[in-house]
Amino acid sequence: MKKTLIRGGTLVTGKEMQRNDILVSVTGEIEEVRPGIPVPKNSEVIGAEGLLLFPLLTDCHVHFREPGFEHKATMATEACAALAGGIGTVCDMPNTLPPTTTIAALADKVRRAATVEGCIIKFFFGITEAAHLQELRALWTGTTMEMKRLRQHCCGVKLYFDHSTGDQRIAGDLIEEVFRACAELKIPLVVHCEDPDVNAAAAKKTTRTDIAAHSLLRPPESEERAIQRALELAKKHTGALHIAHLSTKQGAALVRQAKRDGLQVTCEVTPHHLFLTSDDYVTLGTFVKVNPSLGTREHRDALWEALTDGTIDCIASDHAPHTLEEKKNPEPLKAPSGMPGVETMLPLLLTAAAGSWPHPVSEPAPAFRRLTYSDIVRLCFVNPNRIFPLHSEAPAKGAPLRLALIDPAARWTIAPAALRSKCGWTPYEAWRMTGAVVRILQR
Ligand code: NCD
Ligand code: ZN
């Protein structure tokens, strides 16, 4: 093996961008980071002039479907998709079959993930009934080598306040117990905030069966009510709370205020809630059926504002592949909710950072939007690694080499056939990108 010198690139951190060379040891560890490192004898030189060097990013919300739904996706196929999109660490959700609600199910996933190369997969633990909370306590307090080892692969708890794909709704009377336990044991707690009562009431109010009705059946008030409830519980038990896929103006206002009030609350937003709206049902139909549902431009614009003012901590894909056949259900409201996104997230964000608005239909882009390359690293690497125990190291002396080389000026068009996700489709087909992942470097 030879030493490697990555020369002439611009290293992007969550705070700044700086021209830097990176010297990598024969064992794949970063030895030196500074401008003007002389080429060592007998080394490989990788020219990175004009390229950005990003840490391999973190996507703290994906559904890789294994085990149980391998016809939609597998850990191996989606890890490939993640890497192609510059992502090297993901947090997988518990709505598999079996669901990740027992230590045995977690151990099985950990075993499977060990065979996947290049992409680190961590797992959220799900809870729908009391027995699962017992399992969680055993996992988190166990003193055996095996429990300690498994804990390393678990990034926290995921709760669904209402049903979504995979029927993981938690029993209502158990919710507070879980908030208490997570606060006590200092376990990161993520909540999918939709309120079952608001959703049930909405279902009674409409007889529509067209796809756009999905946004009426899961209305903005549903997220608002659920976030209120989650914040109250987090406050009462003084625990950390992370809100998954923030999607509404009201939700953003609640999180902003909770942060001002000093609550330990963080949240994420998805690319689809940033780049798509309920207007897109017309052309994209069930492809954009997702929970929480897409909202109007008003909600999208509020999310960009919340991203800009620091209310939002992370961008995560909620990568939720389903097969084309499943999505083409003749009764659109019966098509499963969720869309792929792990491979297209970074390109979409690079495009926005380049100052372009990628949506192909000429519609008003959010007036108030600002996103820099450093913001992308902060939102998709620094912050998720601060919120969840993922053990990813930033590219610095002593850290393993894990970089994505980005050409910020590359122009290309998203084509489903070129994407790696097993599902074979994307809502962003034919969208024009500015910025591409040109190479992944890791040992
Ligand atoms: C997710 C899925 O398909 O697993 N679907 C979605 O619409 N986001 C489930 C979920 O997290 O809600
Ligand atoms: Zn999800």
Image (cartoon, grey):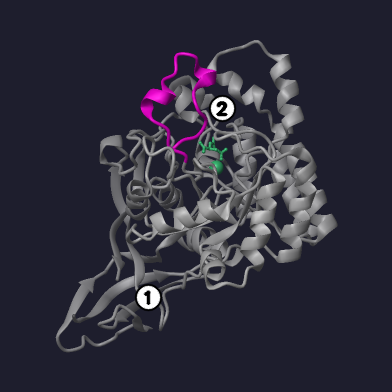
Q: With 331 as the anchor, is 111 left or right in this view?
A: left
Visible residue check, residue 271 = yes
**x, y (%) of residue 48?**
26, 69
User: The N terminus lies in which quarter of the figure?
Assistant: bottom left
| Residue type pointed to by label 2 | Ser
Main structural element of the magenta stretch: helix, strand or loop? loop
Going by the picture, which residue comes out furthest to the left?
42
Visible residue check, residue 371 = no
The structure residue drawn at horizontal position 55% and vertical position 14%, both measured from the top left corner, is 210
Mark 2, other Cα within 10 Å: few <14 / some 14–19 / many ≥20:
many
**x, y (%) of residue 94?**
55, 46
**x, y (%) of residue 164?**
59, 34
Which region shows up in magenta?
A: 320-339
The quarter holding residue 426 reads top left
Label 1 – label 2 distance at C-alpha:
42 Å
* SS class, disc 2: helix
Q: With 50 as the anchor, is 367 left or right in this view?
A: right
Q: With 174 as the anchor, is 157 left or right in this view?
A: left
Of residues 9 and 129, the one drawn nearer to the viewer in this rendering: 129
Q: Is residue 88 magenta?
A: no
**x, y (%) of residue 158?**
62, 49
What mark, if any, has residue 434 been given in the picture? none
CB of mark 1 near ligand 2 (< 8 Å): no
Q: Quadrant of ligand 1?
A: top right
Sequence order check, earlier mark of 1 and 2 = 2
The structure residue drawn at horizontal position 59% and vertical position 67%, both measured from the top left corner, is 386
Disc tally is: 2
Residue on which the image places disc 1: 400
Of residues 211 and 66, the one drawn nearer to the viewer in this rendering: 66
| Residue type pointed to by label 1 | Pro
Residue on which the image places disc 2: 278
